[in-house]
Image (spheres, helix red, strand yellow):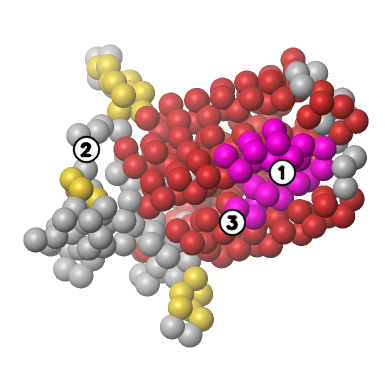
Amino acid sequence: MQALIPFPPLSPDIFSVDLGGFTFALRWYALAYIAGFLIGWRLIVAAMRQPALWPGERAPMAPVAVESLLTWIILGVILGGRLGFVLFYQPGYYLANPAEILQVWEGGMSFHGGLLGAAVAGYLFARRNGVAPSAISDAMAMVIPVGLFLGRVANFINAELWGHPTTQPWGVLFPGYGSLCPVDWEHPCARHPTQLYEAALEGLLLGLIVLWLVRRRHALQFPWLITGTFFTIYGLARFLVEFWRMPDEQFLMRHPQGHVLTLGEFGVTMGQLLSLPMAVAGVVLIAIALRRGRQ
């Protein structure tokens, strides 16, 4: 008999209240977004209060200005994440149903789209407030792993974005559709808990490396170094986990094999296609930062 881990008795909702025909629910995924933004905000504020961390021992902006930056970033993440999902994963469906693009409460957010949205928002904020874009980018890259960790744990609680079937003893028997084997979609089987793989790599490991670079190696004094480190490690981690992760159901409707490109016997998923350029860009940014040296 296969050893597996039954899915714990977790609900996607923290609590729900019936308001007479309308149910208000606070979901773990929403709380992960809120907590990620708040923790990231406080970490950037703390960094701005330590001038010795920054080039020339001068913080790029006042701590009070971080609140305004947070507003820009929230808008960039939500708009970019939603538009990224629409354009990268289901452009045909939303072209036929444009009204549903605004229905973000139904789910459907892309990390890569959210990252692009946050990058645009951070650049516009930097230009408007006379702050070096590299400082805004490095500050954001320093705290994003917190949100990634919380978001991936929330994905696990939601029993979504699970992995391929596995016979490993740490395989999880997810509830509902995720418990069925893709061979016949009738018999249950355990799956890789890829949400936790990503939480460990993209969140915990990446966060610890960035923290060590900032505190021990004075990495913020090398513009773009933290950004490059984030891009490189996230891109490689996501590329790796995609080998065990099942594509989104909506993506499988368009690509039954789960691939957007086929190279010989290997297939490349949309997540890998978007993550590999991130890793390459990260290596380039690291090289530029080290070449320029401490500013």
Q: Which residue is mark 2?
A: 8
Q: Amino acid at mark 2?
A: Pro
Helix, strand or loop under label 1: helix
Q: Is residue 48 above or below residue 106?
A: above
- Quarter of the picture containing the C terminus is top right
Q: Amino acid at mark 1?
A: Ile
Q: Sequence-wise, which precedes: disc 2 or disc 1?
A: 2
Q: Circle 1: is it few (<14), some (14-19), or many (20+) Cα within 10 Å?
A: many
Q: Residue at x 32, y 39 (%)?
A: 158
Q: Amino acid at mark 3?
A: Gly
Q: Position of residue 124 (x, y in %)?
A: 78, 36
Q: Is residue 200 above or below residue 72?
A: below
- Depth-wise, is mark 1 or mark 3 nearer the camera? 1
Q: Residue at x 20, y 34 (%)?
A: 9
- Quarter of the picture containing the N terminus is bottom left
Q: Which residue is mark 3?
A: 235
**Could you tell whether 224 is left or right of 8 in the image?**
right
Mark 2 and mark 1: Cα distance apart in space: 36 Å
Query: Which circle marks residue 226 in the picture?
Result: 1
Helix, strand or loop under label 2: loop
User: Disc 2, disc 1: CB below 8 Å?
Assistant: no
